[in-house]
Amino acid sequence: MCNSIALEDSGQQMIKITQSSIFDHKCDLLVIPCSSIGSVTPGVYRELQSRNLPTELGAIPYGTVHFRTVQYENANTLAYAAAVNAPTRSTENSALRNIAKEIVAYCQQNQVSLANVPLLGTGTGGLTPGESFDVLSSQFSRDQSTTYIVYCFSKEVYENLAVRVDKTEAIDEEEHPRVFISYTGNDKLNASWVRQLAEALRNHGVDARLDQFHLRPGDDLPQWMTSEVIKAEKVLLICDSYYMQKADFRKGGVGWETMIIQGDMLAQGDTKNKYIAIVREEHADKGLPIYMRSKYALNWGKKDIVDENELKDLILLLYDRESEPPLGKAPTYVKNFRKRQSNG
C-alpha cells in the first residue's frame, strides 16, 4: 500500500497526498499534465499509449483544461491540463491557479467523487513541488464534495510535502469504500428505500453510488453502469420480485447490469466477495436472481425503513471488518480435563 495522508477534512471533502502514480488507482477524473501545444512528457506518453488513451490533442490554451470522456476502466474522464507554457517552458502560479479552478468547477458540475491530480508545473514548468501543491490545494479546499488525491512522483517529494501539512490522521486507501447500488425502480417505495439506504451509507463514510445521485441527463446509461460496476469495491444488489424477473430475463437496466456483473464475477473468481445481495422479500427465493442463489444473501424483508442493526452489520462488511467476537481462553475445566487424561 502506498503512503498517504490527509491534508484536511471538511464534511465529505478531503485533500490527500500520496506517493504513487496517477494511473495506479481508479478515479472519476484523471488529470493529465501537458503543455500549451498539447504535448506530454515521455513517461506520461508511455502510460497513455499503453492504455490506448489519447496522447496528443493539439493546442490547448495555456492555463486551461481540456476535458475528454474516455472508455477506460480506471477513469470516466481525462482532464488535459496545459500547465506548461510551451514557448517559455515555464509555469506561472496564476496559470496553475486557473487550472485548479477549472478542475473544481468541473467536479462540482459533474458530481465527481474522486480526482487524481499530479503536481502540475513541476519538472519542465520549474515550480517546486511545494509551490505546486500550495496553489492546487488553495482551490481544491473550496470544494466540499470531491476527494482530490495529489500524487507525488518520489518518496523524497512525498516526505517533504508531508511535513508541510498538519497531518492529524493517517488515511487508509479503503477509508471511503466505493459501493455501487443496483436496484429496480418499478416500485416507488423500493426506490425511496434504496435512496434512504444510500444516504445512510454516505453519512457513514461509504461512497455509495446511485443513479438518483450520480446519473445525469444525456449520460450514456450502459457506459455509466459498466463504469460504476467495474470501479466499485463492492456492489449491493437490492433484490425483490421485480429485480429477480428483470435479472433472470435480461430486461431493462437491471438486465444490462446483470450481464456486466456476471462477467465481472468471472473475472473476480470464487475467492472474491465483491457482490452482496440484500433481499427485500419475506422469502429469499422470491427475490434472488438465479445467478445469485448459490451465494449467501442478506434477507432484510420488506421493511419501510432501514433497520439500524442491519445497517451496522452491512457497514462492517463494506469496510471489510470482521464482526465475529474475539476468541477467549479455554475454560479451566477443559485444561483440568486434559491434565487428568495425561495423568491417567
Image (tube, rainbow, N blue to C red):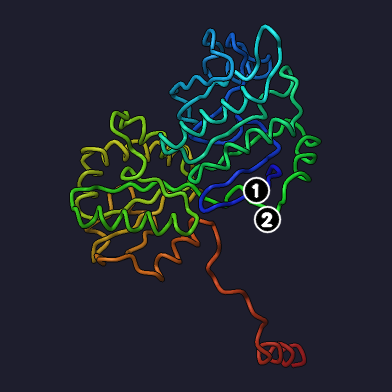
Instruction: Say which residue label 1 marks.
Output: 6
x, y (%) of residue 142? 54, 42
x, y (%) of residue 322? 55, 64
Q: Is residue 216 visible?
A: yes
Q: Is 42 placed left or right of 191 in the picture?
A: right
Nearest to the observer: residue 140 or residue 178: 140
> Which badge, 2 or 1, comes first in the chain's sequence?
1
Name which quarter of the figure residue 293 lies in.
Answer: bottom left
The residue at the point 71 percent across, 15 percent down is 90
Q: Which mark is residue 271?
A: none
x, y (%) of residue 210? 35, 46
| Residue 268, placed above or below residue 95 | below
Q: Is 313 placed left or right of 98 in the picture?
A: left
Q: Amino acid at mark 2?
A: Glu
Q: Is residue 50 visible?
A: no
Quarter of the image that includes the C terminus: bottom right
| Residue 205, placed above or below residue 131 | below
Q: Amino acid at mark 1?
A: Ala
Residues marked 2 and 1 touching at CB (< 8 Å):
yes
| Residue 176, placed above or below residue 150 | below
Instruction: Say which residue label 2 marks.
Output: 169
The residue at the point 56 percent across, 74 percent down is 325
Quarter of the image that includes the N terminus: top right
Q: Secondary structure at mark 1?
A: strand
The residue at the point 53 percent across, 68 percent down is 323
| Residue 152, placed above or below residue 277 | above
